[in-house]
Every structure is written in C-alpha cells, then in structure tokens.
Amino acid sequence: MESEKEITPIEFRRHLHAHPELSFQEHATAAFIEEQLERLGVEHRRIARTGVLATIRGSKTPDNDRRTVILRADIDALPVTERNECPWRSQNNGVMHACGHDMHAAVLFGVIRRFVENPDFRGTVLALFQPGEECNPGGASLVLAEKPFDGFDIRAVVGEHVEPQLEVGTLGFRAGKYMAASDELRFRILGSGGHGAMRKQLKDPVAAGAELLTRLIALNGEECVLSIGRVEAAGATNIVPDEVYMEGTLRTFDEQERKIIHRRIGNIAAEIDSRYGVSTRVDISHGYPCVVNDELLVKRAVTLAKADGLKVEMLPLRTTAEDFGFYCRQYPSIFYRLGVGPEAGRTHTSTFNPDERAIDTGIGFMYSLARQILEK
C-alpha cells in the first residue's frame, strides 16, 4: 500500500482481493500482511513458507502463564477468473478469492487490531495467517510440522468460514463432527485392447472400469460420499484401448470407517481384476482429516453469540473438507460459519461477492470468543 496510514479491515480485504495468489504461492500476500503487522507493532514471523504467525501477549500475563488461543485464517485463492465488476476485482488474471479467504484474513487482522488497542488481558494470542488450505497436503499440516505451538498451553484453535446461506449477522455452529475427511482416488486399469468386434481376444479395461465405477458409487451412504469425476478411455467406436483411467473423491466422517472404505475399494478392484483379467492400480491419496468441533467450546460460543445479540443457527454435517481438521486432531478446536448473505452467490464461482458488513460481525465475535477462552 502506498499510504503510510493505518488501514481498515475492509481496505485490508480489498487489497488481498485485488492481489490473489494460489496455494503456497502467497509471497506478496504474506509480505503485505507483514507490512501491516509492523505498522501495528505486532511481533510476527514466517511459517509454512508463505504464511505469517503473529504473537500478542497480554499486559496482565505473568511470566509463567502459557495460556494461549490460536486464531487461524487461510490466505490462498483459487484458479478462477473473476467476473465481478468492482474497483477491487482481481488484478491477477485467472486467480480469484472465490472462497472468502480474503474475508477471513480481514477478520483476523481486525481482531489483532482490537487486541493491540486493548492489551489488558491475560495470556497469548497467536494469530495465524495460513497458506495453502485449498490443496493437499494442506497448509495446516505444514504449520504443525514446524511445531510452533510447543511450550504453549493451547486452550483452543479458532477458525471461521464465510457462508452465503446465512444472512449477515448470523453465525453457524455444529458440535462434534462437522466437516468430512477427504481422500483423492485414482485408478489405472490395464488390460489388453484391440478390435471392438473381436471380444474373445480382449482383456477389456473399459468393461472392467464400468463395473468398478458402478460398484464404487454403490458405496455411497449417509456418512460416505464417493464420486468419480474423470474417466478416460482413449479408444474409438471399434477400438478398445489397453488402458482406462479414472479419478474421484471420497468423503467420510469417521477414521475407522475411512479405513474400512479404503480396504473395500481395494477388494472390489481385486475382484474385478480376477474376473476380467485386467490389472488395476489403485492410488488413494490421503487428504484432510474430519473437522471435529469441541463440544464445550461450541456450547460456550453459542451462548456468547446469543448474548452479543447475534442470530445463531445449528448446522448439519457438511461433506466438504477443510484442512482445519489437522488442528482438531491435536487441540481443542472450533470452526464456525460467518454469514455473508445469499446475494453473495456460491463460493468457488467467478461471481462470488460476499457482503463486507460481515467483517465487523466476524471481528467482534472472534475477539470476544478469544478473550473469553483466555479468561476461563
């Protein structure tokens, strides 16, 4: 930013929105965040290559008091070409903050400002601007690999995500399991192709692949979602290829069930191989774990939100995934939704346009929740 004056959270958001960067490429984003933290006099350092970790220690904190709350916002954008017409539209063609991460970062920046202005608290606030949420291995896993929270008494990790299905001023919560674990599925079916009219000479990978796809889809259930999104069979009307390739996604809500489904996928492929005389290479790439919200934290957060006059909605299970799940496996955690209004449109689309009034709501609630967690 050219000006030396302190910027507002909305200005912070608009700068990030105009200069989006893809996962693990957030170099200019991190530099901008560092610049703003320096203006506030906030201690900070790089983390997970393109992330920033800020530290604010309350003025009432005894030397031996390690109580800490971690506030997390993701900062990466998506490979989407923006179609909105506004002064702060993306200047990076083909890249857009289409999932609201610019909003998340702006809320966290506003919370940091509140703590700087009101340092009379006990404990430490770690404000994490996390890179790479949108792709494996997930920036959260890289953050934790550096062990930056060792030596702190972590009372909670707090995160939020914008939600266009909630009105501005509304917060959404769910206790316990909330968002799915995600795995990427890839199958390479190797057979022996040839003339489509000479079936006795074939070990048909297309027929094998068709049965594999059908049986995989049959695994879908209330808490298991499996979809195949890509199928490649480079044959022709009378040519059966030697190879078929398929890929898709698996979403589950329980680690034991996740392992069981992985075994079933392998067994199904082996059965089909035996009958069709083909060989299927199964590659299951582990993604994010399930987001599981601490029930006590959610109960306290809901009570606080209502006391602050905010509308609260309880949320259903969600089959989308979030690398915030990595934090849930190690620390008490809470991940909630911040309403940005239905006029915002759908996330991950070229016209997603969240209502910026939600930023003030997000700042006020996250700040109050963090202080309450530190005071308990």
Image (cartoon, rainbow, N blue to C red):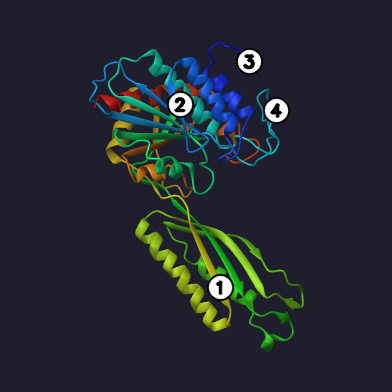
Q: Is residue 238 above or below residue 314?
A: below
Give residue 85's mark. 4
The quadrant in which the C terminus is found is top left
Of residues 83 and 153, the one drawn nearer to the viewer in this rendering: 153
Indicate the amino acid at tag 3: Glu
- The vertical placement of 103 against 175, above or below, is above
Of the two numbered discs 4 and 3 on the same chain, state the one appearing first in sequence: 3
- Taking the image as shown, residue 376 lies to the left or right of residue 76, namely left
- What is the three-letter code of the residue carrying label 2? Leu
Give percent across and percent down for residue 111. 42, 22
Give the crowd class for mark 2: few <14, some 14-19, many >=20 residues within 10 Å: many
Which one is earlier in the sequence, the residue at label 1 or at label 3?
3
Residue 75: x and y, percent?
53, 34
Q: Nearer the viewer, residue 109 or 161?
A: 109
In the image, what residue type sits under mark 1?
A: Thr
**Labels 1 and 4 touching (C-beta < 8 A):** no
What's the CA distance linking mark 1 and mark 4?
48 Å
Q: Residue at x 65, y 72 (%)?
A: 243
The residue that label 3 is drawn on is: 2
Q: Are marks 1 and 3 in contact (CB under 8 Å)?
A: no
